[in-house]
Amino acid sequence: MISERVGHMAIRVPDLDEAVDFYQDILGLVETERDGGTSYMTCNERHHELILIQDEGVRGYEYVGLEVPDAETLEKARSLVYRAGGELIGRTYDGEPGVDRAALLRGPDGHIYKLFVGMEETGPLPEGDRVERFEHYSFKSRNLGKSERFIQEALGFRFSDRLGRNASWWHCESLHHGMAFVFAPKPELSHYAFTGTDLNAIGRIADRLRARGQRAIWGPSRHGPGNNLFLYFHDTAGAMIEICADLALMPPEGDYAARQWTGGLKDINQWGGLPPLRFILTGFPIADIHGS
Ligand SMILES: [Fe+2]
């Protein structure tokens, strides 16, 4: 095992205070630490499930975080990166708030991962209506074959589902997917997802969006691959968030059988019609400010 849990992601936002207010209000996240222009937010006992970085100039996500069990595994993953088609970005480092050590990697499609060890625990949060955890993300990629080989060989992900030749879902823990790829001409983030408790929790989030004058992009409905309930909407930087409930579990914890879906786009909406164009076309860039 290399990755043992999907951790968090770091997003550049044009207005940090506005973004923090949005996540507090809509998702119930709590800020655990503010370090200059960087905010660490959580919804559970972990120090952070989301990192927001103030930046009026560069738009995009900076990296997605994957937790590995120990420092040895971190170095083992680093040793596998080039053979798997990716590259290392700098050295292993420490001193970042909330984690022991970390290292950045770039996949063959340009997507950026931060492997980290030792997420700090914070005390229990006050009562609140909030999402449960950071759960998964979906990347657009120009070459699914290369992307998939990299996450299997360097990051330790395993196959869950495939839709035609255009999308695939992957897991590193019992949840059906922590990562997904969809074919697109440009490598971008399609969306990132937090776990909602159930359909009522998703409804309350939609109501809070409405109170802010914001409408959802798509949902609520149920996906085929993963069998999860979903609701999609934009964050303050223009990236797409999914609230996901009821996500299937893979064996041995669950009985979901990995499969090939052949029904096209209608397979991803089990209750209604085809996904709206705004869902398909939304992409959020990679803020690749890392060098090599
Ligand atoms: Fe998703």
Image (tube, rainbow, N blue to C red):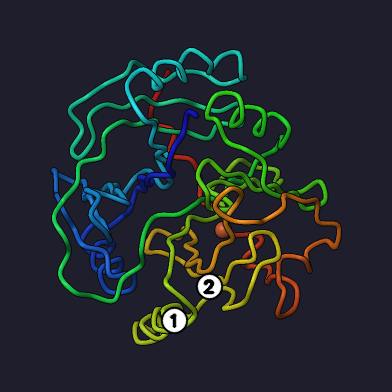
Q: Residues within 10 Å of mark 2 (few under 14, many from 20)?
A: many
Q: Secondary structure at mark 1?
A: helix
For image coordinates 32% across by 51% down, the residue present is 50
Residue 210 drawn above or below residue 5: below
Q: Determine whether the residue tagged by mark 2 lies in a helix, strand or loop.
A: strand
| Ligand 1 sits in quadrant | bottom right
Instruction: Please state the horizontal and vertical placement of residue 64, each as a whole percent of the image.
Output: 43, 41
- Tell whether 102 sits left or right of 271: left
Amino acid type, callout 2 = Leu
Q: Position of residue 291 (x, y in %)?
A: 41, 22
Quarter assignment of residue 133: bottom left
Rendered view: 3 above or below 203: above
Q: Horizontal and vertical percent for residue 129? A: 29, 76
Q: Report the residue that reaches farthest toward the right.
A: 262
Q: Which mark is residue 45?
A: none
Give the residue at mark 2.
Answer: 231
Observer-nearest of 54 and 179? 179
Q: Which residue is mark 1?
A: 206
Which residue does the image show at 20% across and 33% down from the upper left?
Answer: 96
Q: Residue at x 86, y 57 (%)?
A: 262
Which is nearer the eye, 210 or 18? 210
The answer to whether mark 1 and mark 2 are in CB contact below 8 A is: yes
Q: Amino acid at mark 1?
A: Ala
Mark 1 C-beta to ligand 1 under 8 Å: no
Q: Is residue 81 above or below residue 236?
A: above
